[in-house]
Image (cartoon, coloured by chain):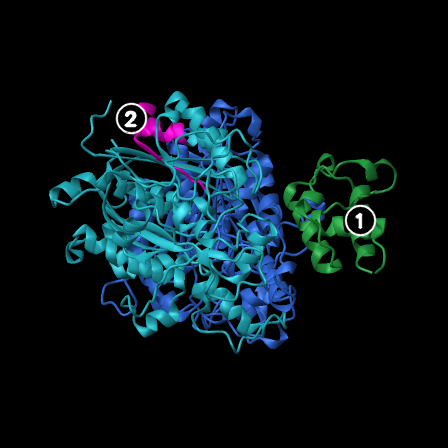
């Protein structure tokens, strides 16, 4: 079976508009968490977020799309365009039905939805926009990307909270394997509005720290929650053979392995299932734990969850058995966009031989026995594991193999 | 060689009754369950009709804490899951959790719960900066509808692949298609899959009012859903859930399970045309059908029944009629086609699974459910839509299709597992 | 609000359908909305806003994409005059 490779990446994240800016800021350890600006956070117990800044939709999208799109749909559309351009992919040049789209979402176009709910309840049903019929539901980003680029292949939408980015890319890989020429996949996610905010605060897992440098500390002795954020990444997937056939001979890397599991119910005596997801992903890639050069961890920032993740990593890789990093300490947790962004960052890490840092974590818990990368580290990297977990028990793991296609002799 | 996947258990909560038997009794006799909305006062709205389930979660065995923490959509999914599990005869104790997964389809997730909570935290829409203090602990589970899959997974004891598929109005087909794929590729041996939606809430009614997609025939609620009829004027919003036990065929045979049908083929395409509009030619739906038939190794003459999307909008019914003709050619005129939305309304993401249930039951009982309220067909809709009267007929192979906002077009073939495969 | 002006229409179209560089003077007043790229949802959105914000109810039949901005101005002003 020919490999499924990533030939294009489009990133819009708190750490930058576009892959280059995101990577430059990430390697430099420049965090982008700050006080929420999308609304006045003063009345809430948590006030920090990783926000996308400097993005003016009108600079990137036709005016006609603006009234009918939530902010995250706009980001999705632009990231898709950038990913396709990065892949040098011209959809009309591919076979009919040749390209599909799979995105993941946590809450859909939630800000758009809050505005419409407010109009409904403060003014009445006649004030609800016709666009509400499609601007907020979970499938909207897939739909709008498909329409804008004429992508009529098999489309999909998955919702598994933060694990969604990996699950969407895995679904895309299935499509490539059974003959679809290319897939646009991943997620841009976030709900930058008060209604989305209070829903996240209700979990009790959002950090209440005032200082951005002390708010989101995964695996740290002072871990006390996470910081939410917006953004993510979209990837273009195709078969290695298909890429070569259209004259593309270098790519970011291969989606080599994947697995997803679900934890036993709360209160069960059965063990959590993250370890099995990691082991099954390795098996799917045909790799051993020793073949993995870096792990991009889920990094919940909540002590019990950090402990569980550390235990799974220790069980698979041995104590301090592999470098582990959480670059989302610079962006916050971006829902399904977070795991998609981790994939993009991991591919860039493999390409450049650089492990980006976990910032602000000054006191990693010794008992976790992790080789936590707190300063940018340069070393050759051939394979990365990306881990993502969703609220309620979702665990996904994906193995990426680096390689620049025909420039490698393998 | 990919494994074959069969349906061994069905659970349903639908307008007209809780349980697969009540569902089948309604649709196989051509009765309708559409009525004036009772969940809230519909008089300020343009469309005042819905297909509501008479569903009491406490009466269906959900505990007070379950009821408190779950949106109605989750409750429908859990109750139908329980029925499906019993129906399948699976011994849950003997399931390998790692080889058991769940896929739940939904278009609008926890819409009712979200709207209800919104009204409180915003104090009736007065405040953009909604109240953190009044937010309930489980609000995040409403925000992110993967909680629907989690609730079902806890009932099943599944620790394999668990997810929500949310492709709008094709979610019910696509979730089952996804689960079938996971078994076929070997990622699981048993998948509990289906879909749920409980969208009958002011925001949903208002947004469909705004695009005039729903019927305004408020003086005739029982006959307002009129797919393919010349006088149709939009769909009736509905709610419901259908969940299935899907298994690898060998797994089912080994335990002597009773099999409803094999999911023999599935495909999805996109029209990439418009978020809500459809071109009249139905090309992409035809392509989805063609590919699903190819995968099932079925030709048009093999198909005994076509279960249509048949939402009852002017554009949809013409679009899919064109699609059927395009791919089935002359056979389109010889094959009964019907829409059960005429009886149970359009429950958005759930309906695709309810329609799969109807197809499986049609195969079991040899009856094609009719299209209710069809008295004078649209001249552009000239196929045999089984008007009003159910039809006895041996049904071995069924095609069911779906079409949804965002351009999604899906098709699925159900067939007898012991059929001769070309 | 006693009349619905070209500027009012321009603002409404911009909000409903996003046209930023709308120049409704000259020939654009005579062009069908469909020819200018306004789809059925945009027209429904415009109809909805006219009703909600201006109290003007136009049958969907009156606001089909075949209509022109000039015709829409006439319809709205006729309706508003009829309410006096």
Percent across and percent down for residue B224 are 48, 49
> Which chain does the numbered disc 1 sit on?
C
> Which one is nearer the viewer's eye here, B275 or B345?
B345
Q: Is residue B305 magenta?
A: yes
Q: In this view, does A397 lie above or below A125?
A: above
Q: Is residue B87 magenta?
A: no
Q: Which of marks 2 and 1 is in front?
A: 2
Q: In this view, does B44 lie to the left or right of A346?
A: right
Marker count (numbered): 2
Residue that mark 2 sits on: B302
For label 2, count other residues whose C-alpha is less than 10 Å away and answer few (under 14), some (14-19) or many (20+): some
**Residue A276 visible to the viewer:** yes
Q: In the rendered view of the protein, which quadrant contains the C terminus of chain A?
A: top left
The span shown in magenta is: B289-310
Q: Is residue B26 left or right of residue B381?
A: left
Name the residue: 83% across, 55% down: C81
Residue that mark 1 sits on: C10
Percent across and percent down for residue C51 are 70, 56
Gap between marks 2 and 1, in whole Å? 57 Å
Secondary structure under tag 2 reads: helix
Residue A64: quarter of image: top right
């Amino acid at each position: 079976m020919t490999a499924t490779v990533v030939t294009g990446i489009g990133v819009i994240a708190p750490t930058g508009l576009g892959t280059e800016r995101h990577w430059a800021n990430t390697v430099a350890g420049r965090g982008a968490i700050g006080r929420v600006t999308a609304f006045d956070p003063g009345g809430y117990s948590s006030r920090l977020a990783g926000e996308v800044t400097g993005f003016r939709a009108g600079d990137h999208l036709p005016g006609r799309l603006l009234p009918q799109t939530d902010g995250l749909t706009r980001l999705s559309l632009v990231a898709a365009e950038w990913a396709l351009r990065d892949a040098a992919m011209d959809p009309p040049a591919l076979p009919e039905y040749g390209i599909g789209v799979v995105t993941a979402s946590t809450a859909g176009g939630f800000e758009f939805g809050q505005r419409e709910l407010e109009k409904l309840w403060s003014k009445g049903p006649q004030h609800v926009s016709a666009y509400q019929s499609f601007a907020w539901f979970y499938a909207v980003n897939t739909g709008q990307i498909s329409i804008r680029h004429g992508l009529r292949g098999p489309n999909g939408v998955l919702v598994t909270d933060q694990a969604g980015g990996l699950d969407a890319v895995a679904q895309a890989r299935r499509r490539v394997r059974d003959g679809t020429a290319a897939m646009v996949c991943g997620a841009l996610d976030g709900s930058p509005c008060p209604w989305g905010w209070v829903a996240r605060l209700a979990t009790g897992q959002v950090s209440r720290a005032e200082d951005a440098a002390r708010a989101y500390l995964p695996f740290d002795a002072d871990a006390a929650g996470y910081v939410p954020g917006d953004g993510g990444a979209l990837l273009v997937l195709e078969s290695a053979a298909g890429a070569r056939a259209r004259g593309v001979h270098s790519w970011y890397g291969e989606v080599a392995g994947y697995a997803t599991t679900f934890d036993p119910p709360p209160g069960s005596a059965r063990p959590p299932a993250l370890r099995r997801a990691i082991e099954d992903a390795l098996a799917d890639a045909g790799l051993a734990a020793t073949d993995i050069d870096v792990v991009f961890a889920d990094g919940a920032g909540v002590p019990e969850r950090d402990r569980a993740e550390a235990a799974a990593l220790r069980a698979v890789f041995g104590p301090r058995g592999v470098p582990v990093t959480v670059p989302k300490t610079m962006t916050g947790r971006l829902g399904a966009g977070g795991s998609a962004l981790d994939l993009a960052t991991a591919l860039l890490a493999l390409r450049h031989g650089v492990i980006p840092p976990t910032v602000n974590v000054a006191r990693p818990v010794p008992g976790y026995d992790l080789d936590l990368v707190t300063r940018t580290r340069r070393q050759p990297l051939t394979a990365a594991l990306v881990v993502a977990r969703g609220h309620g028990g979702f665990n996904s793991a994906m193995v990426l193999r680096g390689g620049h296609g025909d420039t490698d002799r393998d | 060689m990919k494994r074959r996947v069969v349906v061994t258990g069905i659970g349903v909560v639908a307008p007209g009754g809780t349980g697969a038997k009540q569902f089948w009794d309604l649709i196989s006799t051509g009765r309708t369950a559409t009525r004036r909305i009772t969940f809230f006062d519909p008089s300020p709205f343009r469309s005042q009709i819905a297909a509501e389930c008479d569903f009491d979660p406490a009466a269906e065995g959900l505990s007070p804490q379950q009821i408190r923490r779950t949106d109605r959509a989750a409750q429908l999914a859990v109750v139908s899951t329980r029925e499906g599990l019993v129906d399948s005869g699976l011994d849950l104790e003997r399931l390998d959790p790692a080889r058991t997964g769940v896929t739940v389809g939904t278009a609008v997730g926890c819409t009712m719960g979200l709207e209800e909570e919104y009204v409180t935290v915003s104090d009736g829409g007065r405040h953009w900066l909604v109240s953190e203090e009044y937010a309930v602990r489980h609000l995040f589970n409403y925000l992110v509808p993967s909680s629907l899959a989690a609730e079902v997974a806890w009932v099943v004891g599944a620790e394999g692949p668990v997810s929500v598929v949310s492709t709008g109005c094709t979610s019910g087909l696509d979730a089952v298609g996804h689960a079938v794929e996971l078994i076929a590729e070997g990622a699981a041996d048993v998948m509990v899959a289906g879909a749920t939606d409980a969208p009958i809430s002011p925001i949903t009614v208002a947004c469909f009012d705004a695009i005039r997609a729903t019927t305004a025939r408020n003086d005739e609620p029982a006959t307002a859903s009129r797919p393919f009829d010349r006088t149709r004027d939009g769909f009736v919003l509905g709610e419901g859930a259908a969940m299935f036990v899907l298994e690898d065929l060998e797994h089912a045979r080994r335990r002597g399970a009773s099999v409803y049908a094999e999911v023999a083929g599935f495909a999805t395409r996109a029209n990439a045309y418009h978020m809500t509009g459809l071109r009249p030619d139905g090309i992409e739906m035809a392509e989805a059908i063609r590919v699903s038939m190819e995968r099932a190794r079925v030709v048009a003459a093999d198909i005994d029944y076509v279960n249509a999307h048949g939402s009852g909008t002017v554009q949809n019914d013409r679009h899919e009629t064109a699609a059927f003709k395009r791919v089935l050619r002359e056979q389109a005129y010889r094959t009964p086609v019907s829409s059960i939305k005429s009886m149970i309304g359009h429950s958005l993401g759930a309906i695709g699974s309810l329609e799969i249930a109807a197809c499986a039951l049609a195969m079991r009982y040899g009856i094609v459910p009719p299209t209710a309220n069809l008295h004078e067909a649209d001249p552009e809709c000239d196929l045999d839509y089984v008007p009003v009267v159910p039809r006895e007929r041996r049904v071995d192979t069924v095609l069911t299709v779906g079409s949804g906002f965002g351009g999604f077009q899906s098709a699925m073939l159900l067939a007898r597992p012991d059929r001769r495969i070309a | 609000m006693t009349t619905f002006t070209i500027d009012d229409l321009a603002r409404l179209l911009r909000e409903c359908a996003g046209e930023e560089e709308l120049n409704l003077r000259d020939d654009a007043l005579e062009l069908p909305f469909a020819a200018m790229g306004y789809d059925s949802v945009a027209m429904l959105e415009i109809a909805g806003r006219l009703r909600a914000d201006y109290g003007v109810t136009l049958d969907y039949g009156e606001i089909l994409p075949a209509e022109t901005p000039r015709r829409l101005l006439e319809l709205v002003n006729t309706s508003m005059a009829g309410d006096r």
